[in-house]
Image (cartoon, rainbow, N blue to C red):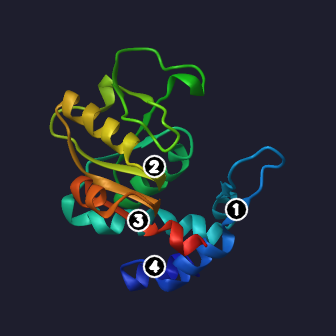
Amino acid sequence: MLAVALAQDGGMPAALKNRLVELFAWIDPGPGASHLVSDISGWWRDPATLAALGPALVDPFRAARPTVVVSPAVTGYLLGPLAATALGVGFVPAHKPGDGRLPAGSLTWAQSPPDFRGRHVDLAVRDRHLGPGDRVLVVDDWVATAAQARALYDICTKRGAEPVGTSAVVVDCPPAVADELRITGLLTTADLG
């Protein structure tokens, strides 16, 4: 029903936003934890929400005519293909060295500025999948500092591709950063309580 409402509305219906909030949870990881952990697994379990996410994420960028979607590991590997399918374009995964075996072949690397935990994240894409003339939409689940988006934009520049913006389910970065990097989101952290 959400996917049908989205297709008829041409944008994100209030029903999708409400459902995303309903399916989200903050989890207490237990003794010694200094903060709650976000649990977005409910988004993946609900088929209507899953079907509606791709179209909702790409809608603000359709006029920019992206030719490819790039998403960082790990959750981006789910959202990126949903967005790419909604646009009718391909998907390029951005790999992190700590997430398992790196792909064979030539890679272009970039390191992020400090993220919300103060870490510098290394990201890489296969050279043969991103190049001049590509118009890149970056898709991720959560943008807190935009550190990974900046690293992916850097990779785009190195490959001669043009980043058209970033779309995320939750955007929590400062408005000036969101404006600078053309970041849009379906929710903010305030929406999640």
Type of amino acid under label 1: Trp
Type of amino acid under label 4: Leu
SS at mark 4 in the image: helix
Q: Circle 3 sits on which residue? A: 185
Q: Which mark is residue 80?
A: 2
SS at mark 1 in the image: strand
Badge 1 or badge 3: first in the primary sequence:
1
Q: Position of residue 144 (x, y in %)?
A: 45, 53
Above or below residue 62? Residue 97 is above
Dot 2, how many residues are within 10 Å of its Cα: few (below 14), some (14-19), or many (20+)?
A: many
Near-viewer residue (36 or 139)? 36
Name the residue: 55% across, 84% down. Answer: 15
Badge 2 or badge 1: first in the primary sequence:
1
Q: Is 10 left, or right, of 95 in this rendering?
A: left
Judged by depth in the image, the label closer to the viewer, 4 or 1, is 1
Judged by depth in the image, the label closer to the viewer, 3 or 4, is 3
Name the residue: 41% across, 63% down. Answer: 57
Type of amino acid under label 2: Gly
CA gap between label 2 and label 3 equals: 14 Å
CA gap between label 4 and label 1 equals: 27 Å
Q: Circle 4 sits on which residue? A: 6
Badge 3 or badge 4: first in the primary sequence:
4
Above or below residue 1? Residue 67 is above
Q: Position of residue 85 (x, y in %)?
A: 43, 55
Q: Circle 1 sits on which residue? A: 26
Q: Quadrant of the C terminus?
A: bottom right
Badge 2 or badge 3: first in the primary sequence:
2
Badge 2 or badge 4: first in the primary sequence:
4
Q: Is 130 left, or right, of 85 in this rendering?
A: left
Judged by depth in the image, the label closer to the viewer, 2 or 3, is 3
- Marks 1 & 3, CB-CB < 8 Å contact: no
